[in-house]
């Protein structure tokens, strides 16, 4: 029983850490995308779409949906051709 509790504690701890790491990732990815977009042609549909995805990612981050935010931000970075 003690072993099971210890394992549960470790799993919960790791899950929490992973969540925190993801939460810290969104602003970094969003900033990276915005910096890249700023150097590109803002009239281009691709850049416009990527920027709107970054806006969406930022909104998701504020809602606490960090996994979705990271996914959206990564999609925008890919669209902009940013190397991570
Ligand atoms: Cu976040």
Image (cartoon, grey):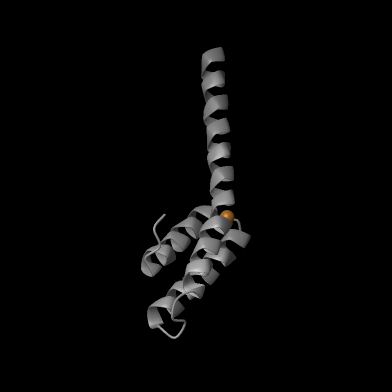
At 54% from the left edge and 51% from the top edge, which residue is drawn? 25
Quadrant observed for ligand 1 in the rendered image? bottom right
The answer to whether residue 54 is left or right of residue 47 is right
Give residue 59's quadrant in the image: bottom right
At 52% from the left edge and 64% from the top edge, which residue is drawn? 57
At 45% from the left edge and 79% from the top edge, which residue is drawn? 48
The answer to whether residue 82 is left or right of residue 64 is left
Q: Viewer-proximal residue, 14 or 36?
A: 36
Say above or below: 39 vs 58: below
Query: Where is residue 80 shown, x and y percent of the image?
Result: 40, 69
Query: Where is residue 65 shown, x and y percent of the image?
Result: 55, 56
- Determine the residue located farthest toward the front in the rendered image: 39
- The quarter of the rendered structure image containing the C terminus is bottom left
- Determine the residue located farthest toward the right in the rendered image: 62
At 51% from the left edge and 62% from the top edge, which residue is drawn? 32
Query: Where is residue 58 shown, x and y percent of the image?
Result: 57, 65
- The mark tally for this picture is 0
- The quarter of the rendered structure image containing the N terminus is top right
Say above or below: 28 vs 11: below
């Amino acid at each position: 029983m003690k072993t099971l509790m210890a394992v549960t504690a470790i799993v919960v701890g790791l899950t929490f850490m992973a969540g925190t790491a993801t939460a810290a990732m969104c602003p970094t990815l969003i900033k990276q995308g915005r910096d890249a977009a700023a150097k590109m042609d803002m009239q281009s549909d691709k850049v416009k779409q990527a920027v709107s995805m970054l806006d969406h990612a930022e909104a998701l981050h504020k809602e606490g949906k960090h996994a979705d935010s990271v996914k959206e931000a990564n999609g925008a970075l890919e669209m902009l051709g940013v190397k991570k």
